[in-house]
Image: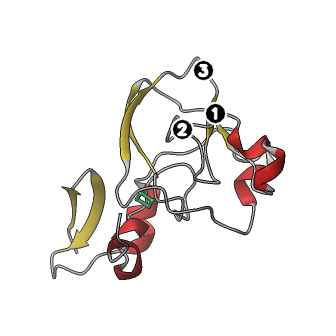
Amino acid sequence: MAQLLHRISGYLVYSSSSGKKDKNQAESALPKNLLEDFHSASSQPENGYIYDKKPFKMVLDPEKHYNWCLCGQSKSQPLCDGTHKAMGLKIKLRPVRFKVAEKKEYWLCNCKQTTHRPFCDGTHKREDIQALKR
Ligand code: FES
């Protein structure tokens, strides 16, 4: 069965000729964090504060390391500015250190609910997130 790759609002989505989305193939089209296996922050079980209801597009450089804000409190979204260290906020979430394979535009999650940190996987489209008043 032929598979088609669509770009919908910046997301790559696979669908079969019948129009059904294939989640596994869609996830394999998402970019990979090359540091995911080296930093435990990638696998923290909790998600942060929903900062925005849509992702943020950024050109990333493969020569650099980045820290993606997971707590949702950074003033430099979608990247960490160190706010999580503020004693008064008592934030336990740590930023996710990441690196990409090539220089290009990436959609970084800004709802902080993605299952593919730090990249947007479309989770922000959930009704409960879109229903938030912001
Ligand atoms: S912004 Fe898309 S999953 Fe978070």
Q: Residue 81: which numbered mark, if any?
A: 1
Dots 3, 2 in contact, CB < 8 A = no
Residue 120 in picture, x, y percent from top left: 43, 55
Is the CB atom of the residue marked by disc 3 within 8 angstroms of ligand 1's nearest atom? no
Q: Is residue 40 visible?
A: no
Decide which of 79, 41 is in the foreground and name it.
79
Q: Residue furthest top?
A: 63
Pointer 2 residue: 75
Which residue is rendered at x = 75% and y = 47% of the image?
37
Q: Residues within 10 Å of mark 1 (few under 14, many from 20)?
A: some
User: Which quarter shows the C terminus?
Assistant: bottom left
**Amino acid beneath label 1:** Asp
Left or right of residue 73, residue 88 in this image: right
Q: Percent from the top left, x then y, of residue 40?
A: 81, 51
- Determine whether the residue tagged by mark 3 lies in a helix, strand or loop: loop
Residue drawn at x 52%, y 34% as measured from the top left? 76
What residue would you read off at disc 3? 64
Could you tell me residue 113's position as x and y percent? 53, 65
Relative image position of residue 122 (x, y in whole percent): 38, 64
Point out the tag, 3 or 2, that comes first from the N-terminus.
3
Kind of residue at badge 2: Lys
Dot 2: element: loop
Tag 1 secondary structure: loop
Query: Which one is in front, 47 or 76?
Result: 76
Residue under the point 50% across and 41% down: 78
Q: Earlier in the sequence, mark 3 or mark 1?
A: 3
User: Above or below — where is 81 with respect to 23?
Assistant: above
Horizontal placement of 55 versus 28: left or right? left
Q: Nearer the viewer, residue 132 or 12?
A: 132
Between 2 and 130, which is closer to the camera in this rendering? 130
Spatial separation of the CA atoms under disc 1 and disc 2: 7 Å
Label 1 close to label 2 by CB (< 8 Å) = yes
